[in-house]
Every structure is written in structure tokens, then in C-alpha cells.
Image: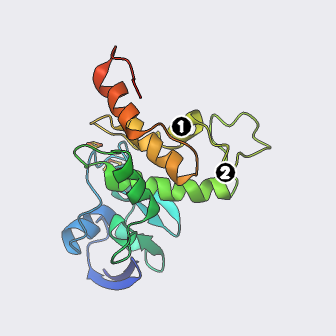
Amino acid sequence: MNITLTINGEQHPLAIEPWVTLLDALREELGLVGSKKGCDHGQCGACTVLIDGQRVYSCLALAVMQEGKAIITIEGLATQETLHPVQEAFIDHDGFQCGYCTPGQICAIVALLEEVKRGCVSAVTPDLSTPVSIAELCEAEIKERLSGNLCRCSAYNGILAAVQQVMGQNPPSPMAEVLVSDSGNQEISS
Ligand code: FES
Ligand code: FES
């Protein structure tokens, strides 16, 4: 099928079979390899991209169904010289180790922030009639809302702190996070 996808603001004409997933079209046809293939079964979130502002597992989305939609991948979040604030926060808080899950995590967080602004609730929101604001979003809410993105390196402390920073909250200092994750019984001295 001949289709045109709008990815990161650019038009990409493609001739592809109808069963090709968006993830494979991005990686194999267009060379946009930032979106990662972890499970290829909708279970890990490594392939998360934004479609019309919603987070989507691109391994479960057919490319031919995305014509006319605005697709944003990790490659489209930074401008030429400026990282997206979520990307900055990941660096500030060591939100990654191998980095394989990171593009999906960051895309999911960008969508998460917009979902909270729209008043979307989660499975752990105490009162479904009273959505929480970004300033009030607690750890349990952040973890629940990111539960569709797994990290095999278990960089979850840093990821949580990065989200808190972007939300204007006060995450623990990066040194405290390192001491907590590295030391087990070691006391935090700062
Ligand atoms: S590769 Fe898509 S959810 Fe795992
Ligand atoms: S940083 Fe390695 S899988 Fe998350």
C-alpha cells in the first residue's frame, strides 16, 4: 500500500505491506531507530511513541492506519540544540543505565503530563470525581501511570525523580538516589 506518514512534522511517503507495524516502519523503512523493540507484544513499552498526543505502543499499531495523524517519536522531542525538559531531567537524575527503555519512558512521560493536565485519573486516584493536579501527583500515581513501561536495568528511582523534577516537585538529590540504590544498608550522609 502507498501511504504517507507524518512523523516529527515531516511527510514520509511509504510503500509497505498492510501488516507492517508502525514500529517496524519507523525502524526498518525510515531509519528512525530511537523507538525500541523490546517484546514486540505490547508488554514492555520500549516502543512507545505519541500519536495525536496519545501514547501508543507502536509494536501494536499498524502503520497503514496512521495516515493523517501526527506521530512524534523520541527523535522529534528535542529541537536542534535544546533537549526536551523530560530528557534533561533523565540526565539530571540518572534515569537510565543501558538506555534501551529510555525513549519509550520519555515519550510516555510527555503524554502522562498532558493526561494529568486534561484531568485523566488512574487506578490509584483516590477520588475519581476529583482529578489530581500535576503539583499534587504523588509517587504512587506516577508509578501507576508509568506501569506500562518496564526497565530491565531497574532505573526506576531515577525515572521517578525525573518525573518529579519536570512536575516542579522536589525529588531527592541524585547523590541520595545513588546511595539508596547502591548501598542497601549504607546510611545516607547528605
Ligand atoms: S516492544 Fe512494544 S510494548 Fe514491547
Ligand atoms: S535503562 Fe536499561 S532497560 Fe531501562
| Amino acid type shown at disc 2 | Cys
Q: Secondary structure at mark 1?
A: helix
Furthest residue toward front: 190
Q: Position of residue 9 (x, y in %)?
A: 41, 82
Q: Quadrant of the C terminus?
A: top left
| Pointer 2 residue Cβ closer than 8 Å to ligand 1 | no
Q: Relative to residue 159, is residue 86 depicted above or below?
A: below
Position in image of residue 128 (x %, y %): 75, 40
Residue for point 66% across, 57% down: 117
The residue that label 1 is drawn on is 144
- Which residue is identified by label 2? 120
Give the x, y percent position of residue 158. 39, 40
Mark 2 surroundings: few (<14), some (14-19) or many (≥20) residues within 10 A: some
Crowd tier of the residue under label 1, counting other residues whose Cα lies within 10 Å: few below 14, some 14–19, many 20 or above: few
In this rendered view, identify the residue nearer to me: 91 or 144. 91
Q: Does the residue at mark 2 contact the one at mark 1 (Cβ under 8 Å)? A: no
Residue shown at the point (32%, 69%) measured from the top left? 75
User: Mark 2 falls on what kind of element?
Assistant: loop
Which of pointers 2 and 1 lies earlier in the amino acid sequence? 2
Amino acid at circle 1: Glu
Residue nearest the observer in this picture, 156 or 13? 156
Q: Is the CB atom of the residue marked by disc 1 within 8 angstroms of ligand 1's nearest atom?
A: no
The image quadrant that residue 76 belongs to is bottom left
Could you tell me how far apart the alpha carbons at marks 2 and 1 are, in whole angstroms?
A: 13 Å
Residue at (33% x, 78% y) in the render:
80
Figure disc tally: 2
